[in-house]
Amino acid sequence: MEQNPLEKTRRIRKAIRVGNQKRKVMSDLLAGAYLAKGTIGNVGTPGAPIATFSLVVVPSQHSVTGTVIITQAVQGPDSHIVVPVTGKIYAAGLGKFTQLVSLKGQYVHSVPPPAIGSFLAEFNAHFAIDNAWNGVGGFSYYQHNVENVPVAAAKNLQTELA
């Protein structure tokens, strides 16, 4: 069955319009997305666990996703942990803090000898920050709970967000 050339052209144009609309919808979903990097913890305090974050923030979707690396100067199974995270970001009306962020993720925790084995451990973080990603917060991971510590944007990021 042969197609009418006019009908074929209409179908092609419609397919192009639909494709363009889908691309526009995807770009609208990521509107305003930016990268946020920084630390949670008492940087400079010997032995203090520090959570370093690198996150893609999509304010229009209230979502954050990325990686957190927990480091600690004390050697052991918890001295370097990499955690893929997802979370939420919302506007806040708390004085100087303009945003509230929550993160969660899981990582493989290996049991030190003489025990044998590994399991998925939970990671959670929460912080209240200003527009430059500086504020206060906390995080928890297997048998560790760190609260009321500084949140600081990476130095090169502070100038971009200011």
Image (cartoon, helix red, strand yellow):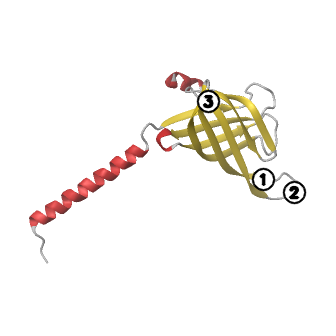
The residue wearing badge 3 is 129
Tag nearer the camera, 3 or 1: 3
Taking the view exactly as shown, the residue that stands out farthest to the bottom is: 1
Q: Residue at x 68, y 41 (%)?
A: 125
The residue wearing badge 2 is 115
Which one is nearer the viewer's eye here, 24 or 56? 24
Q: Earlier in the sequence, mark 3 or mark 1?
A: 1
Q: Position of residue 149 (x, y in %)?
A: 73, 30
Crowd rating for badge 3 (residues with CA inside 10 Å; few <14, some 14–19, many 20+) = many
| Side of 162 relative to 11 (left or right) | right
Tell me the SS state at disc 3.
strand
Q: Position of residue 110 (x, y in %)?
A: 78, 53
Tag nearer the camera, 2 or 3: 3
Q: Residue at x 79, y 46 (%)?
A: 77
The residue wearing badge 1 is 110
Q: Earlier in the sequence, mark 2 or mark 3?
A: 2
Quarter residue 10 falls in: bottom left
| Side of 22 relative to 1 (left or right) | right
Quarter residue 54 falls in: top right
In contact (CB < 8 Å): disc 2 and disc 3 = no
Measured Cα–Cα span from mark 2 to mark 3: 41 Å
Q: Is residue 152 above or below residue 62?
A: above
| Side of 27 relative to 146 (left or right) | left
Measured Cα–Cα span from mark 3 to mark 1: 33 Å
Amino acid type at circle 1 is: Ser
Amino acid type at circle 3 is: Ile
Q: Earlier in the sequence, mark 1 or mark 2?
A: 1
Q: Position of residue 104 (x, y in %)?
A: 65, 47
Taking the view exactly as shown, the residue that stands out farthest to the left is: 5
Measured Cα–Cα span from mark 1 to mark 2: 9 Å
| Side of 19 relative to 148 (left or right) | left
Q: Is residue 151 above or below residue 67?
A: above
